[in-house]
Amino acid sequence: MKKQNITSLTTLDFPGQTARESIRQYPAISVVIIGLNVERYLYHCIQSIRQSNYPQDKLELIYVDSRSIDRSCEIAGQLPEVRLIRLEDDQPNAAKARNAGALHAGHNLIQFVDADSYLHPDWLANAVNHIGRRVVAVAGGLNERYPNRNFFHRMTNLEWNLRWGKQGWSTKDQEANIFGGNVLIRRDLMLASDGYDSNLPAGEDPDLSMRMRHRGLSIRRLIIPMATHDINIGDFRTYFKRTRRTGNAYFQLASRHWRHERGYLGKILIRLIAGAILPPLLITAGILTGQIIPGAVMAAVVALRLVFKTGRFARMFSISRRLAFQYSLHLAMAVYPQFIGLTGAALAHLKQSMISKINSRKMDSLKPGKQFNLVGYPNR
């Protein structure tokens, strides 16, 4: 697919100025929406962009569909201002959709939007002030549209705005390690960093984030509102599946970026592995040594250790201690599906490595120079 010409960002070289100062000429933005079976969201997502406090003649709207079987393409096709791209791929994913949108985009600034997210009216006008020569991507506050629907929505609403950066875990505006699916990004530097990895089943956003930072570029996470989102989790099965994908993503990131990101990824993996393995080990040790009650107590302390940080969570999020306590329980519970996703990805990687080694040995045995007898064994 032919790449589009890349325009310059001459008006965006000085981040930190006010909107009136730095946007004398509003830069053009390609808004790339991606989705799969999103008929319930797509029209409202597009309308949120059309209602943005940004010059509409500076916005290009693109919808990339990942082979939906509902009315998503029909809805996009009925809107003349939206350019529809159908992703013709037997195994579509978010990375492939974003790459396709980037290659079809006509402008150097791209606002990626997941179709189940609705942009805040002021986001684009505020975000462009922070893009510059070194700041390659900007993300902002993401809130659940229905935060009180159930336990899962409440927890997700808290986690969207918790980010890791140079100041550690924080909810403040700061330089950050990663961005998510909704992000304003420079197309030229995204493509120069090889875009999203289409082979990743999960974690494609932090993977690209890390590769861009390894090039000396910077990511900003702002506390101003960016969008609302619908996580749409109604039962534990869906929650388990989604959280397991997070564990899969952790392995993919560690296998690719451990050299540069061991500090960030190491803390995550230690917390995850220790939290999942230590409690059952302590219970087993207690049974084997006849110290069942002490073993069970120690296992409970390890499993629920984050409960002791309830006050810290309450202060960090400015929430009630009751909600902070629920959040600590969520973190303790999420460790197990994440660990399953992590170990599953590790085993699949090990299996693939073994198959590759076996195939490599077979190919070596067939290299020119070896003499074979009639039954196929090398002559000695």
Image (cartoon, rainbow, N blue to C red):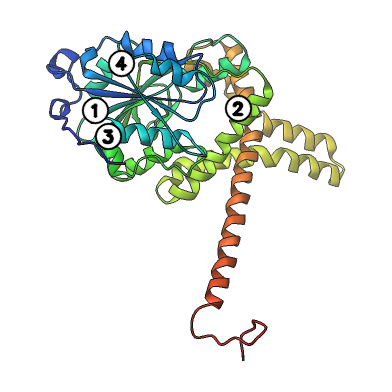
State the mark number for residue 341: none
Find disc 4 in the rendering and name its residue.
Answer: 81
Q: Amino acid at mark 2?
A: Leu
For marks 4 and 2, give the CA distance: 43 Å
Residue corresponding to mark 3: 187
- Element under disc 1: loop
Residue 355 falls left or right of residue 106: right
Q: Nearer the viewer, mark 3 or mark 4?
A: 4
Provide the residue designation for mark 2.
331
For label 3, count other residues whose C-alpha is less than 10 Å away and answer few (under 14), some (14-19) or many (20+): many
What amino acid is found at the position of numbered circle 3 in the picture? Answer: Arg
C-alpha separation, residue under disc 4 versus residue under disc 1 = 26 Å
Instruction: Tell which tag, 4 or 1, sits nearer the viewer.
Output: 4
Frontmost residue, 202 versus 165 = 202
Q: Amino acid at mark 4?
A: Glu
Q: Mark 1: which amino acid?
A: Ile
The residue closer to the viewer here, 348 or 174, is 348
Q: How much space separates mark 3 and mark 4, taking CA atoms?
A: 21 Å
Chain-order first, disc 4 or disc 1:
4
For the C terminus, the quadrant is bottom right
Q: CA distance from mark 2 to mark 3?
A: 35 Å
Q: Tell me which residue sits at (15%, 19%) in the image.
A: 22
Name the front one of labels 4 and 2: 4
Residue placed at 31% from the left, 44% from the top?
Answer: 193
Residue 205 can be seen, yes or no: no
